[in-house]
Amino acid sequence: MKILYHHRTQAEDGQAVHIRSLIEAFQSEGHEVREVALVERSGEDSAKPAPEKDAAPARWSPWALFGLLPGFIKELAEYGYSLHARRRLMRAAREFQPDFIYERYAFGNTAGVSAAEALGLPIILEVNSPLVLELSRTRGLAFPRLARRVENGIFKRATRVCVVTEVLKGMVVELGVAPEQVFVTPNGVHPDLYSDLDREAARQDLGIAATRGPVLGFVGYYRDWHRLDLVLDGMATEALATAHLVLVGTGPAEEGLRARAREVGVEDRLHFAGTRPHDRIPAVLPAFDLGLVPAINPYASPLKLHEYMAAGLPTVAPDQPNLREVLTDGHDALLVTPGDGPALIQALSRLATDEPLRAAMGAAAKQTILDRELTWRGNARRVVAEVASL
């Protein structure tokens, strides 16, 4: 099939990883993809997951100044992008003659559904979070009623809405979208990237080659709400007295975590390994003995979780519906009540002190990825199957 892929993302973060990986998966399945984006890459680079630091140069866009705008102007500019994007989509569609449009949902963006209706094409709308709800809780919205009306309209006008969890599907259905109009494609991985990995090389890369004791690992942009402070509290207990916490990435929680580590006396076992290009993440994960997801949004499909699993790591994570869609407590992970520090510490202690249990759960986690087809190519196949069924 010929797929016109539209997104409004310019950041080199987890969103970009998702976009590049899915485009690559579509192409690996034999489909032709044309990308229309806020800031486009050129040539074959557009199909590759972009590393964090060595990304292919992107064209300058006036949208680069977006973050400097006052809140209400920024919000109006997001709506205004739809007019510009619709023209570009219409032009690209007439040249490319796609079978369908695939669009990553962005706040206030009506371009995809509007162009699809005008062209008589199906549109698959990928929704990773309920953005009106999310933005109202974070940056705030100047025109909340308008935002809700526009978002609901976009969801209802899409031919199909592709969400990352069953929990998010329920939220979209509650907004008035027909259940049969919504399907689930979780975050994915490329399993072949996680074979023949070298633990010692990974530990050297992260600067922890000389450490002794279990390594508790976290990958991503760490914020206070990730509750990594609870892990530090656990490291002050006797059961985790030799454990090390290694953070790959960066984030605003760093100062607070350093302070907490000093307070509980574990600062020598807290390691900030810095960021890595995303294509190097598989190679560093073998340095971990277990993966951490201490807290996560109730509707999210965390990319880091699937990466831990593909690397054969057991995970300690919150016991909540979106994670139970993937994990089975006691089989491939230990799930604990969200925010329950003592329960989290108990789970960490159990895995940290039982190497055979870690190995068994890690192997089960890797098998879950394969059995559930939690891969980018699996997601590409699910999307194409939905279009074929129309």
Image (spheres, rainbow, N blue to C red):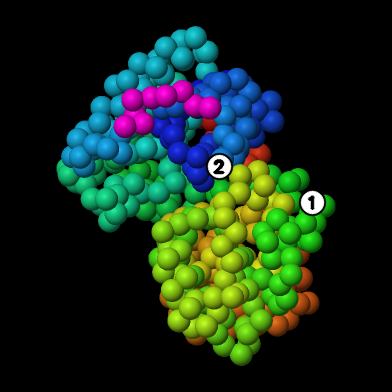
Residue 341 position, x and y percent, is 47, 81
Q: What residue type is labelled 2?
A: Glu
Q: Residue furthest bottom?
A: 238
- Dot 2 alpha-carbon crowd within 10 angstroms: few under 14, some 14 to 19, many 20 or more: some
Q: In which quarter of the image is the N terminus?
A: top right
Q: Is residue 60 magenta?
A: yes
Is 95 positioned to the left or the right of 290 in the image?
left
Give how far apart the Cα atoms at labels 2 and 1 are.
22 Å
Q: Which of marks 2 and 1 is in front?
A: 2
Q: From the top left corner, tell me how far across and down residue 239 is, in percent.
A: 63, 87
Of the image marks 2 and 1, the number of the one nearer the N terminus: 2
What is the magenta range? 57-65
Disc 1 crowd rating (10 Å Cα; few below 14, some 14-19, many 20+) is few
Instruction: Tell me the quarter of the picture where residue 307 sits.
Output: bottom right
- Residue for badge 1: 195
Query: Where is 69 relative to 198, above or below?
Result: above
Magenta span includes 51: no
The relative height of residue 23 versus residue 379 in the rendered view (above or below) is: above
Identify the residue shown where x is 35% and y is 43%.
Answer: 177
Q: Residue at x 62, y 32 (%)?
A: 48
Is the residue 127 above or below the residue 368 in the image?
above
Does residue 84 show up? Answer: yes
Residue farthest top in this picture: 95
Q: Total of numbered circles in the picture? A: 2
Residue found at the very far right of the displayed protein:
196
In this picture, residue 137 sits left or right of residue 321: left
What amino acid type is highlighted by mark number 1? Ser
Residue indicated by mark 2: 52
- Determine whether 247 is above or below 125 in the image: below
Q: Where is residue 53 in the image (x, y as percent from the top left)?
A: 56, 40
Frontmost residue, 83 versus 31: 83
